[in-house]
Amino acid sequence: MRGTSPVAVGAAFAAVVALAGCGTGSADPGGSDTSAYTDGSRVPKVENEDDIPELPLARYEFSDSDTERFTQAQARAAQRCMADFGFTDFPLDPALPGSVNMVGGAAGMLVAVAMPTPFGELDLDEARRFGYGWDPKAADGGQVKKARAMTDAEYRVFYNADRTPGLTVKGREVPGTGCYGKAATGLTKGVGNTTRMWTYTSGWAGALAKKALKDPEVSEALRTWSTCVEDKGSARYEDREAAFRDKAWHRGDDGNTPRTQRERDTAVADIECAREHNTVGEWWAGSARSQTADIASHRAEYEAVRRDQDVVRASVRRVLRD
């Protein structure tokens, strides 16, 4: 019997608030039929991101839709809690009050840059234009505008950031973690093991991904890809992630690259070779085999995770009333 990964435990608090351990979610219903490839016994043909089948672990992860709905339900529950303290016009998505200073700011933040898919980039047009980086003009395009800022009084009840014991407002005691924390706790009521639910699958996904790279067929596919990229005039890389993370691209503080001609040429060769030799299909199949074997060996733990996730989904449905 296997316990929770020590690495995963450290992410538990963030996961409770924002489903930090969520997965990629269900496959695009408009994409190709991937049902025949679930256990990795067959190799799918992958040329574009939509061709990548859903991996077995996805069944035991929160999807992107789950994450979005959890966030909506938490905001709704927190808003109702705030109304109980007299803040009847409290917004669903408030900004921080002006009196709260974010320590460090953008310059002090650690930027984590990940490949567009677990198996690398597959958009050839993007590679031709931006290499292993992205369009700097679109960097802030996905940010959602916040509603009005909280007042200091609202902030104190919403987060109870200083954890004031016995804090009362309007004759009611403020929850120890504020209305925001209370909302998250309410959505997980009835869950058998919250740490396991948030972290078990994601905690082992990284180890299984490394194991997949040692799969003989995956290793052979990556060697073939590496030779192909080298033959096209680029450096020789161990795998696609090594190409993506090459220090020669000189990523800035925001994680973006200068998008030099050499970088763009390498990114193009990377994708062309991956398509030519179906590198991603072979890599995905090895990952699926690794995950399928792990699920079979620890079926009870994975199914317990799934049951607890279903409890949360039911709580979310009740809050959103659908």
Image (cartoon, rainbow, N blue to C red):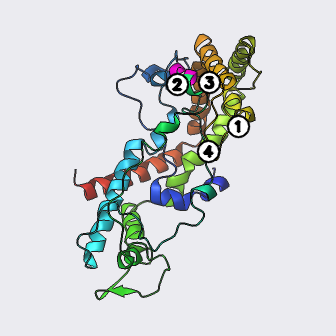
- In the rendered structure, find residue 126 and report the number of the disc placed on it: 2
Quadrant for residue 168, please give it.
Answer: bottom left
Amino acid bearing label 2: Glu
For this view, does 121 lie left or right of residue 61?
right
- In the rendered structure, find residue 140 and report the number of the disc placed on it: none
Label 1 sits on residue: 250
| Residue at the image point whose x is 43% and y is 59% from the top | 191
For this view, does 115 lie left or right of residue 181?
right
Task: Please tell me which of labels 4 and 3 falls first in the chain.
Answer: 4
Q: How far apart are marks 1 and 3 (CA)?
A: 27 Å
Secondary structure of the residue carrying tag 1 is loop
Label 4 sits on residue: 204
Amino acid bearing label 1: His
Label 3 sits on residue: 283
| Image x and y of residue 215, in percent | 70, 25
In terms of depth relative to the viewer, which is nearer, 30 or 237?
237
Q: How far apart are marks 4 and 2 (CA)?
A: 31 Å
Task: Please tell me which of labels 3 and 2 falls first in the chain.
Answer: 2
Task: Please tell me which of labels 1 and 3 falls first in the chain.
Answer: 1
| Residue at the image point whose x is 31% and y is 64% from the top | 77
Secondary structure of the residue carrying tag 3 is helix
| Image x and y of residue 90, in percent | 28, 68
Q: How many marks?
A: 4
For this view, does 32 lie left or right of residue 291?
left
In terms of depth relative to the viewer, which is nearer, 105 or 212?
105
